[in-house]
Image: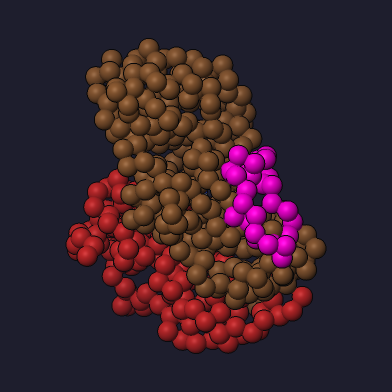
Chain colours: A red, B brown
Amino acid sequence: MVEKTITVGVNGMSYTRTVEPRMLLSDFLRQELTLTGTHVGCEHGVCGACTVLLDGRSVRSCLTLAVQVDGSEIETIEGQGEIDRLGRVQEAFRQHHGLQCGFCTPGFIMAVTDLLRHHPLESDEQIREALSGNICRCTGYENIVNAVRELARERGPLT
Amino acid sequence: MASLRYDGISGTMKPAQFDYAVPNTVEEAARLLAESNGDGKIIAGGQSLMPMINFRLVKPSILIDVNRIAGLNRIELVGKRVRIGATVRHHQTASDPLIAKHLPVVHDAMQHVAHVTVRNRGTFCGSVAHADPAAEMPMVTRFLDGTIIALSIRGERRIPAADFFVGSLVNSLEPDEMVLAVEIDVMPDEAGWGFEEFAKRHGDFALAAFAATLRMDNGRARDVRIGMMGVGEVPLRLPEIEEILEETELSQAVLQAVAEKLNDILTPNTDIHASADYRRHLSGVLAKRALRSAWVRAGGRKEATNG
Ligand SMILES: Cc1cc2nc3c(=O)[nH]c(=O)nc-3n(C[C@H](O)[C@H](O)[C@H](O)COP(=O)(O)OP(=O)(O)OC[C@H]3O[C@@H](n4cnc5c(N)ncnc54)[C@H](O)[C@@H]3O)c2cc1C
Ligand code: FES
Ligand code: FES
């Protein structure tokens, strides 16, 4: 087994590391870069907790290998805002009580960031469909849908 | 030792060890695959392969990543066929104008595949290669009689979809062959189509799905094609149902005959998601809905099938 040296941009910072090919992107972020905001729930693609953006599109970091993202730009929850200066999506989730335990929240925030960039979100049905890849065991989703509805309205139609 | 895993130092790894190669050309990919002596795996979107690797259900000696090979991410019209390259992702297929115009039933089917985040990575050809009997792209490839273009160091081979899907998660590729593209004949402009599926939650694998294409000739259905998935070991084309519909005017009675025939010929499994009986019943319901849409889109009267 041959280790690989990769250079990855994460939230605007460049990192170079040597990793085993089998290292998942989720473990790379959490263990190598100690960016533990990206959560891991199922580690087989079902729950969405590990969602990050890869070159601007949401992906499941547990189904992506670190070696595959050599030369790419990753965005994680750590790049979205600070405790006293939340990002817009984070702020909407806070205002609408779109989280309780918060385990699923980083994944939702990153997925919604992609949705706002690329998806119509014109009706509640579209919003619910678009959120269907992320599982939340606490909120019952209503308040998450409320937050996303407000964000979608604020954004307006996709051009 | 769970505590070792997430404390910021390198802990245990989910997958077993493997080597990793990122070829720049398809020839190089084919060579690497041949050199792996059957132990290598192509990785495209990774949305089906990585879960199996994480569970160590699959332990390849080497992963051959085709994602950086230039030119494979295109959907093109080649004569009267739509050609979908090996790294065309689901989100691309879902919004591609050529697919919407020439293969509208594929466009509709794609709206049921997985979730946004999975569609951002998963590929059409990867899904076909994976050959899940409850996956939409194998189903449309099969019932539209698509062709799988396989490549190895021995050259290219064209495999008709009817010969490609041989079992649940089993295709007829040789160990050293990769999928280069899938080609599907364009649907005639005047064709009507319908695609209906039932899943417990949007984006989950379906309990069953039914697809139909047909055109109208003097008020009668012609060139009827019927496909189903989720009710067998492989995606199905159903000539028994096509026969019932060919050259008929679609009516309540014909739809009923279709539902009854489905009940006779289908042998779905009972699993934790649904019983065989439920799936048979569901098939009839989905068939009626899909056939009504196909009929009306082909120019037929709605009243004929209502009631
Ligand atoms: C949560 C979740 C929900 C999903 N829901 C659905 C759904 O509703 N419907 C659905 O159809 N799918 C669903 N999928 C699966 C998804 O569509 C996969 O992306 C797809 O089945 C496989 O495509 P891939 O590109 O990810 O292939 P990979 O995972 O990369 O590969 C799958 C298999 O095909 C082989 N392979 C890939 N490309 C090639 C090639 N070019 N040549 C030879 N072999 C190749 C690999 O070696 C592997 O054995 C879901 C996945 C997840 C994680
Ligand atoms: S941890 Fe990646 S999807 Fe659940
Ligand atoms: S807030 Fe607890 S899982 Fe979503």
> Residue B1 vs residue B240: left or right?
right
Name of the residue lying farthest toward the right: B37
Nearer to us in this view, B199 or A62: B199
Q: Quadrant of the C terminus of chain B?
A: top left
Q: Residue at x 31, y 73 (%)?
A: A87
Nearer to us in this view, A112 or B88: B88
Rendering quarter of residue B156? bottom right
Residue A50 placed where, x, y %?
A: 51, 63
In the depicted structure, whether residue B251 falls above or below residue A151: above
Residue B95 placed where, x, y %?
A: 35, 56
Q: Residue at x 46, y 18 (%)?
A: B244
The verdict on residue B84 being magenta is: no
In the depicted structure, whether residue B31 falls above or below residue B115: below
Q: Residue at x 46, y 68 (%)?
A: A52
Rendering quarter of residue A116? bottom left
Residue B124 placed where, x, y %?
A: 51, 54
> Residue B233 vs residue B125: left or right?
right
The answer to whether residue B237 of the structure is visible from this angle is: yes
Nearer to us in this view, B6 or A9: A9
The answer to whether residue B129 of the structure is visible from this angle is: no
In the depicted structure, whether residue A154 falls above or below residue A135: below
Q: Residue at x 53, y 41 (%)?
A: B145
Residue B26 placed where, x, y %?
A: 62, 69
Rendering quarter of residue B154? bottom right
Q: Quadrant of the N terminus of chain B?
A: bottom right
In the depicted structure, whether residue A69 falls above or below residue A99: below
The residue segment tinted magenta is: B149-176
Number of numbered labels in the structure image: 0
